[in-house]
Image (cartoon, rainbow, N blue to C red):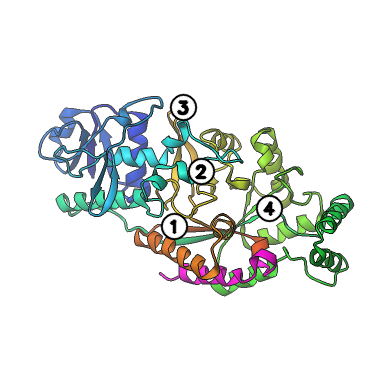
């Protein structure tokens, strides 16, 4: 067993050390202590996290961030170790030339998102405001790599430490923002769409709309048979996130009361996991979140414990607090809309820490790394370049035996309009992701 000495055990260092060893390094046999005598008398694997060591045990210098309370602008010293950028670097004689636990905590807690920052027009924290983007490590799973550096120095001193091996995995996820392009919209929305296209002289879309409504052509967003075939072909186990919010400017799915929509959801739930896609409007009216979860639970007749925010609308810590209150156990929102990569520096699921309340919460964060809309709309790059960018991210996840999570939408799998050729991207991503 690894015994870890900390002069004062705080919620921050307890959370961070537990997360590093339990979630990132798969080491269950460790304990924390602030008892000097117990630590000195212990015969076995020992590590001190403090300003100075007590003896000849493994020593990690503590910069002080995890002893504090509250949120202040941090003066972060950057360094480099074994070709990897580091945060909270120091020149103290330590097993690592940086405070790995403060670095991990800063990234996972999303400390920087609590500080003043610019937001985009959807009131979201943007990639360009992040330390990872500014310092050029957004496409690197730095938290996982830091943890592996720690594992290496521990094994160098204590070769028999019983770490379990990390295992690479792939989780495909699909958001259903708009189940159908033309079907089930109701008379008012159908006529509104028709006249909107007429005013813009979009005659092809008018033709498509008429043919779909006459059942002479498939709805362009109805890609569910294709998805099911792909899932069978590759033995995938996807998660679907369903938008069931009231109609609004940024929430335009069809009504949850439509029988065909309910049938679709039930069908998806027969072979996939289902989660709620909290509406954009639920950020202003938090009572709507409860209502939307109940709608989905009533349709699928099971508890809903997974979520991803519509428009990736994530505000720290309010969004996660609201999910905790609704007994959501897993959230898949952690990622950027306009950039691929690792928003929290990791591709490993980890527990949410409420920095305002200084408490670990019963909610696991599952970061995603790739969204097709990022490539097509935000970065406006082509199919070949998109495949190359996705494979580079997958390579990084595999390098640390992490969890690769992709985000796709039903409408992008229909070979229509903006998405012609993108089924190739989707299938090449899946095939590459499944290579162990």
User: What is the C-alpha distance between the residues marked 2 and 3?
Assistant: 24 Å
* Residue 66: % across, % down: 32, 31
**Dot 2, how many residues are within 10 Å of its Cα: few (below 14), some (14-19), or many (20+)?**
many
- Depth check, mark 2 against mark 4: the one in front is 2
User: What is the C-alpha distance between the residues marked 2 and 4?
Assistant: 21 Å
> For the residue labelled by badge 1, is the local secondary structure a helix, a strand or a loop?
strand
> For the residue labelled by badge 3, is the local secondary structure a helix, a strand or a loop?
loop
| Marks 2 and 4, the one that precedes in the sequence | 2
Tell me which segment is drawn in magenta: 413-436
Which mark is on residue 226? none
| Marks 1 and 3, the one that precedes in the sequence | 3
User: What is the C-alpha distance between the residues marked 1 and 2?
Assistant: 23 Å
Seen as rendered, the residue at the extreme top is 69
* Residue 416: % across, % down: 70, 68
Residue at 82% x, 53% y is: 258
**Viewer-proximal residue among 393 and 33:** 393
Instruction: Please name the residue that numbered disc 4 is placed on.
Output: 177
| Marks 4 and 1, the one that precedes in the sequence | 4
Instruction: Please name the residue that numbered disc 3 is placed on.
Output: 357
**Dot 4, how many residues are within 10 Å of its Cα: few (below 14), some (14-19), or many (20+)?**
many
Residue at 84% x, 51% y is: 189
- Depth check, mark 2 against mark 3: the one in front is 2
| Marks 1 and 2, the one that precedes in the sequence | 2
Instruction: Please name the residue that numbered disc 1 is placed on.
Output: 403
Tell me if residue 320 can be seen: yes
| Marks 4 and 3, the one that precedes in the sequence | 4
User: What is the C-alpha distance between the residues marked 4 and 1?
Assistant: 24 Å
User: What is the C-alpha distance between the residues marked 4 and 3?
Assistant: 33 Å
- Inspect the magenta stretch and tell me whether residue 381 lies in it: no
| Marks 2 and 3, the one that precedes in the sequence | 2
> For the residue labelled by badge 2, is the local secondary structure a helix, a strand or a loop?
loop
């Amino acid at each position: 067993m690894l015994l870890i000495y900390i002069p004062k055990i705080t919620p921050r260092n307890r959370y961070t050390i537990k997360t590093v060893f339990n979630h990132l390094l798969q080491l269950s046999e460790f304990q924390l202590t602030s008892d000097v005598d117990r630590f000195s008398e212990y015969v076995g694997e020992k590590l001190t996290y403090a300003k100075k060591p007590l003896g000849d045990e493994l020593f990690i210098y503590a910069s002080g961030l995890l002893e504090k309370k509250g949120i202040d602008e941090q003066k972060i010293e950057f360094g480099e170790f074994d070709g990897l950028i580091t945060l909270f670097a120091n020149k103290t004689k330590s097993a690592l030339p940086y405070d790995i636990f403060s670095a991990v905590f800063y990234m996972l807690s999303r400390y920087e998102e609590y500080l003043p920052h610019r937001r985009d027009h959807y009131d979201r924290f943007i990639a360009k405001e992040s330390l990872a983007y500014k310092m050029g490590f957004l496409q690197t799973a730095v938290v996982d790599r830091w943890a592996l550096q720690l594992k290496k120095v521990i094994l160098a001193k204590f070769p028999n430490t019983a770490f379990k091996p990390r295992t690479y995995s792939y989780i495909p996820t699909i958001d259903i923002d708009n189940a159908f392009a033309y079907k089930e919209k109701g008379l008012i929305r159908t006529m509104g769409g028709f006249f909107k296209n007429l005013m813009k002289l979009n005659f092809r879309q008018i033709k498509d709309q008429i043919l779909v409504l006459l059942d002479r052509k498939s709805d362009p967003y109805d890609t569910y048979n294709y998805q099911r075939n792909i899932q069978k072909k590759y033995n995938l186990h996807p998660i679907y996130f369903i938008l069931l919010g009231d109609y609004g400017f940024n929430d335009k799915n069809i009504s949850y009361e439509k029988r065909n929509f309910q049938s679709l959801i039930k069908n998806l739930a027969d072979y996939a996991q289902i989660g709620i896609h909290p509406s954009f409007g639920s950020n202003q009216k938090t009572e709507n979140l409860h209502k939307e979860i109940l709608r989905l639970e009533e349709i699928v007749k099971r508890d809903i414990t997974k979520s991803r925010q519509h428009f990736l609308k994530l505000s720290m810590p309010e969004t996660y607090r609201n999910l905790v209150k609704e007994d959501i156990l897993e959230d898949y929102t952690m990622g950027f809309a306009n950039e691929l990569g690792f928003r929290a520096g990791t591709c490993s699921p980890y527990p949410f820490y409420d920095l305002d309340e200084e408490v670990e919460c019963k909610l696991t964060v599952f970061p995603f790394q790739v969204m097709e809309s990022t490539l097509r709309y935000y970065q406006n790059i082509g199919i070949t370049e998109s495949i190359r960018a996705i494979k580079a991210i997958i390579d990084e996840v595999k390098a640390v035996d992490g969890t690769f999570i992709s985000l796709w939408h039903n409408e992008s799998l229909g070979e229509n309009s903006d998405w012609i050729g993108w089924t190739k991207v989707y299938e090449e991503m899946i095939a590459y992701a499944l290579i162990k």
